[in-house]
Image: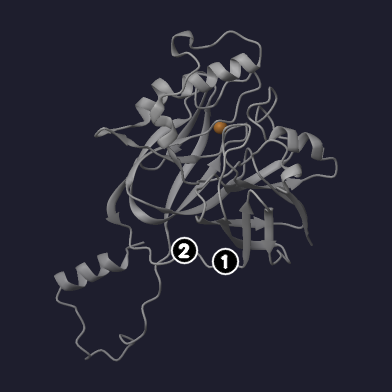
Amino acid sequence: MPKLNVLFTLAVAFGLVLTGCDSSGSNQPAQPEGPDVVEVSAVHDHEAGEHLFDLATDEVPSGWTTFRFDNQGHQPHFLILEKMPTVDGDQKTVEDSKAEVVPVFQNVMDDINGENPSFPDAGFELPAWYSDVAFVGGPGITSSNETSETTVNLEPGTYVVECYVKTEDGTFHSVKGMIEGLTVTDASNGASAPPESSLQLTVSSKDGITVDGAIGEPGEHTVEVTFADQTAYAHFLGHDVHLARLGDGTDMDALGAWMNWAAPGGLAGEAPATFLGGAQDMPGGSTTYLTVDLEAGQYAWIAEVPNPDGKSMLKTFTVD
Ligand SMILES: [Cu+2]
């Protein structure tokens, strides 16, 4: 959809700037422009044994942007946005992440699983610059054959997008190819407003997940998610929030245990519930939006942290 500034440029180019002679609505206030949409698919290359992102673009303008994440693979996936630092004038990129970060995390995971490191040369120590990587949201865990929508306000910069769900044998999807670079340019996409929301959710280290309002009936809902603060837990990462559809037989203890990547079976293979997206880790004070289309049923908001229930980060609700 063309943005207002594009329309204005075209109008000037064609001498169409209105001077009051048009009575057909030129005095109407401008409608806010909605976020740009970036289509991303998660795909599985059976022959190569790879999990991959199929990103519609590797460069987007800055501003409110909706990631529409279509999981065409056979395992759950997410897409976390990592804003890469500049160190002594050297902009870190996805290549640095692939060389110095991903292999280290895999070695740590191998060690937890009692196995030899997959990347012996990479060792077990993260580069110093890794502490300056900013996690800035993105689509949450999305199960196979589901599509999720997460809207974030993108700042210009060099980003890495990755998924660190694991295969059944404990290999991170990022090692299996699910890591890409994304450039957010200085140009604005012209989106003047985030989506309108009908529900406010807050996640904090102190109060866990709290929800203001209720999803009263089935259908499409947009949820405003605010990160009141951010901190690092025992799995080295912060909190986030995901939406899971529960079945009659969903094992809630197993679901809670699955949310810790640093546990041998955690975040690996099939999930104990159907995930419908969410909001990946963001700094304290950040706001993001989830658009969900829900049928009647049982659901849970849950964070990807060790023992989410004990942190008040597992909240069930019913839509009927
Ligand atoms: Cu994945």
Between residues 94 and 65, which one lies in front from this camera angle? 94
Left or right: 307 as drawn, with respect to 109: right
The amino acid sitting under disc 1 is Ser
**How many C-alpha atoms fall within 10 Å of the one at disc 2: few (<14), some, or many (≥20)?**
many
Q: Which mark is residue 67?
A: none
Q: Is residue 183 visible?
A: no
Left or right: 23 as drawn, with respect to 149: left
User: How far across and how far down the image is residue 92, in percent?
Assistant: 33, 32
Between residues 147 and 84, which one lies in front from this camera angle? 84
Q: Which mark is residue 194?
A: 2
Local SS, label 2: loop
Q: How many marks?
A: 2
Give me the residue at 40% from left, 75% from top: 31
Q: Are marks 1 and 2 in contact (CB under 8 Å)?
A: yes
Between residues 269 and 44, which one lies in front from this camera angle? 269
The colour scheme of the drawn protein is one colour
Q: Is residue 225 visible?
A: yes
The amino acid sitting under disc 2 is Pro
Quadrant of the drawing holding the N terminus: bottom left
Give me the residue at 63% from left, 32% from top: 234
**How many C-alpha atoms fall within 10 Å of the one at disc 1: few (<14), some, or many (≥20)?**
some
Quadrant of the drawing holding the C terminus: bottom right
User: How far across and how far down the image is residue 204, in percent?
Assistant: 62, 52
Ligand 1 contact, mark 2 (Cβ < 8 Å)? no
User: How far across and how far down the image is residue 158, in percent?
Assistant: 33, 40
Residue that mark 1 sits on: 197
Q: Vertical placement of 86 versus 102: above or below?
A: below
